[in-house]
Image (cartoon, rainbow, N blue to C red):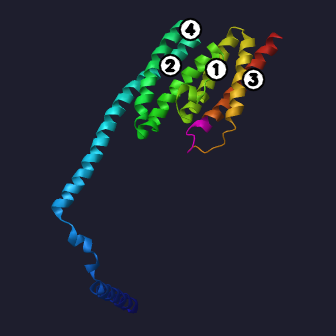
Amino acid sequence: MRQKNKRFYSTSYLRLHNTMVLEAMSYSVYTGIDQIKISNLQKRIRGIVEEIDAVLSSREKVRDELIKMGRDIIKLSGWIINALHRASLEEAKRYLEEMDNKAKIFIKKARQDLYLWHSGFTNNVLSEYAEAKLFFEVIVNGRLLSHNDLDIEYTPYLQGLGDMLGEMRRLALDMMRTNDLIRAEKLLDIMETIYYELRALEYPDALIPGVRHKIDVARRLIDDTKTLLLTIKARIA
């Protein structure tokens, strides 16, 4: 009973205290409220919203265009890689030319809006673009392009470079099946060289999204490929 009375008096005291504080407060210091005219406020906020709406409307239109172009670029990237695995060089070149033309338009349009340029969707499209371009240039022309050569940011470039190592392993396996072990071993050396340089990028995922994971995967692919190559060489020795 005493505890109930104690809680009652405590609660009553708090209510009385809060009432006294509210009565002592003066809201007259908030003079801005009195100065605002609703008609002017409505006009002001309407102008702000219309300005934002115009930006978002334009962004949505560009984004829809980028999505369509991006799908085409990703599709062509896959076709190029498949053609290269079939040693269909002329077919790969045709697809590459078409992809390059679309990628130039895509990059120019995406760059006009930094929000879209740095979006995950744009990075995904450009990483697929980079993968196909890098794979083609390495195995056909014997050179490694940079992110500046491709006119893209370093994140999609690194993502594409990491994915390219997977395609190089696939090609090395095909070479082993046809007993082209010298080229398979050279391809493995190229993979290891790229991997060891990429491994030096000890940065968090926030700075290079997805890259560390691709590097870790590449290490396993290289080890598996090396083990298989050594096994085949031992069998025919």
Q: Nearer the viewer, mark 4 or mark 2?
A: 4
Question: How much space separates mark 3 and mark 1, taking CA atoms?
Answer: 16 Å
Reply yes or no: does residue 209 show up in magenta.
Answer: yes
Question: Is the Cβ of the residue at disc 4 closer than 8 Å to that at disc 1?
Answer: no
Checking the image for residue 168, the label placed there is 1
* Residue 137: percent from left, percent from top: 60, 17
Q: Earlier in the sequence, mark 4 or mark 1?
A: 4
Horizontal side of residue 72 vs 38, given as left or right: right
Q: Nearer the viewer, mark 2 or mark 3?
A: 2
Asked if 100 appears above or below 94 in the picture, the reply is: below
- The part of the chain drawn in magenta is 206-213
Q: Nearer the viewer, mark 3 or mark 4?
A: 4
Question: How much space separates mark 4 and mark 2, taking CA atoms?
Answer: 14 Å
Residue at image point 76% right, 15% down: 232
Question: Is the Cβ of the residue at disc 2 closer than 8 Å to that at disc 3?
Answer: no
Badge 3 element = helix
Question: How much space separates mark 4 and mark 1, taking CA atoms?
Answer: 16 Å
Checking the image for residue 227, the label placed there is 3
Q: Earlier in the sequence, mark 2 or mark 3?
A: 2
Q: Earlier in the sequence, mark 3 or mark 1?
A: 1
Name the foreground residue: 151 vs 236: 151
Asked if 154 appears above or below 74 in the picture, the reply is: below
Reply yes or no: does residue 148 show up in magenta.
Answer: no
Residue at image point 70% right, 18% down: 187
Badge 4 element = helix
Checking the image for residue 89, the label placed there is 4
